[in-house]
Amino acid sequence: MTSRILLLVTSPRLPAGLLTAEAWDAVRAYPVFAHAESEQAAALRVAGVEVTVLDTDAQGLLDAIGDGPGAVWLAGPTGDQTFARQLGLRLAREPGLAELELIYGSWDPPGARLLDAVTVMDRLVSPGGDPWKRAQTHQTLAPYLLEESYEAYDAIVSDDPEALREELGDVLLQVVLHARLAEEQPDGHGWSIDDVAGGLVEKMVRRNPHVFAGEQVQDIEEITANWERIKQAEKERESVLDGIALSQPALALAAKILHRVERGSLSVPLPEALDLGSSLLKVVADARAAGLDPEAELRRAALEYADAVRAAENVGPSE
């Protein structure tokens, strides 16, 4: 009878011992070998499965199996690719020697690489890591958060999916770095990326009762109204203007203030256009009344002017 060699691959991002039923059947049916000790090997031993460490090559495994019905090779975190390739070539030359099968004991869950990002950032900020990152504060990093967000915005405007993927990674870097630095806060005031993610999850569940609580809604307008109602109850704001990001560009800030005034059904007249600032505020109000985004309109006009400047210089248009 031809022996079976099962190459058991597991996700290093899941707890050791969390395996599929097929994997458990395999490790209980055949002798289990591994190249080195690991958390997975330890977890199997706790469950009563004997694991033998074989620091050997493909032929060494075949010798260990002998005339037995087969064996399970517990792949390491990288999948033991070199060993698997060597074993595959060896069996390809002698087809009747054994059958090689790949089975997955566990898979990376969605978002698994986010755990890698957190692990890498922890290494960079911990002692012995990157001196520059260790020296940063929320205040020194603030300009980079804005810069990376603008670059992601540019990728969206340019309709460049690959650039957007990269730029969102840079935004994520800022989020993970801020969270890791926050862990260093003294006197119990620190928080971690888990606190950030946990708060986000709670907010998403709380503000979407039509998805998570069975609330019936008729349309998107009702969903938006529910979101605003729940948000207002959470924040207990005294003014319709509370919560506006005051550091955003002036045109966008003016548009947001006017939007909040309109949404709050307030009747507050615009200041008389006596200076440049009040005149610009009037222009923003007129743009919103016409259904236009003043920030986007000014950006478009500025970029068109920039292209005209480049043309006058005999330089190609901006990208």
Image: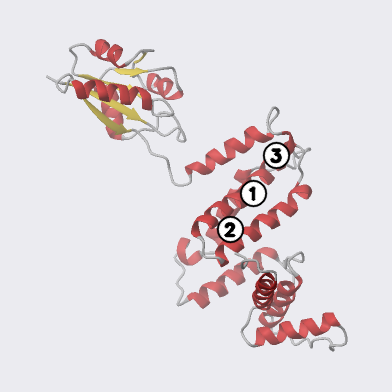
Q: Can you tell which quarter of the image residue 57 is in? A: top left
The residue to which callout 3 is attached is 183
Earlier along the polypeptide chain: callout 3 or callout 2?
3
Q: Residue at x 32, y 26 (%)?
A: 85
Marker count (numbered): 3
| Mark 3 residue type | Glu
Query: Residue 120 at what x, y percent from top left?
Result: 59, 36
Q: Can you tell which quarter of the image residue 286 is in? A: bottom right
Earlier along the polypeptide chain: callout 1 or callout 3?
1
Query: Residue 313 at what x, y percent from top left?
Result: 70, 69
166 lies above or below 16? below
| Left or right of residue 318: residue 42 | left
| Mark 1 residue type | Val
195 lies above or below 238? above
**How many residues crowd mark 1 within 10 Å: few (<14), some (14–19), many (20+)?**
some
| Mark 2 residue type | Lys
Q: Residue at x 62, y 38 (%)?
A: 121
The residue to which callout 2 is attached is 203
Q: Nearer the viewer, mark 1 or mark 3?
A: 1
For mark 2, give the secondary structure: helix
Q: Residue at x 28, y 17 (%)?
A: 31
* Residue 175 tag number: 1
Residue 30 visible: yes
> According to the image, what is the colour scheme of the structure?
secondary structure
Q: Can you tell which quarter of the image residue 24 is in? A: top left
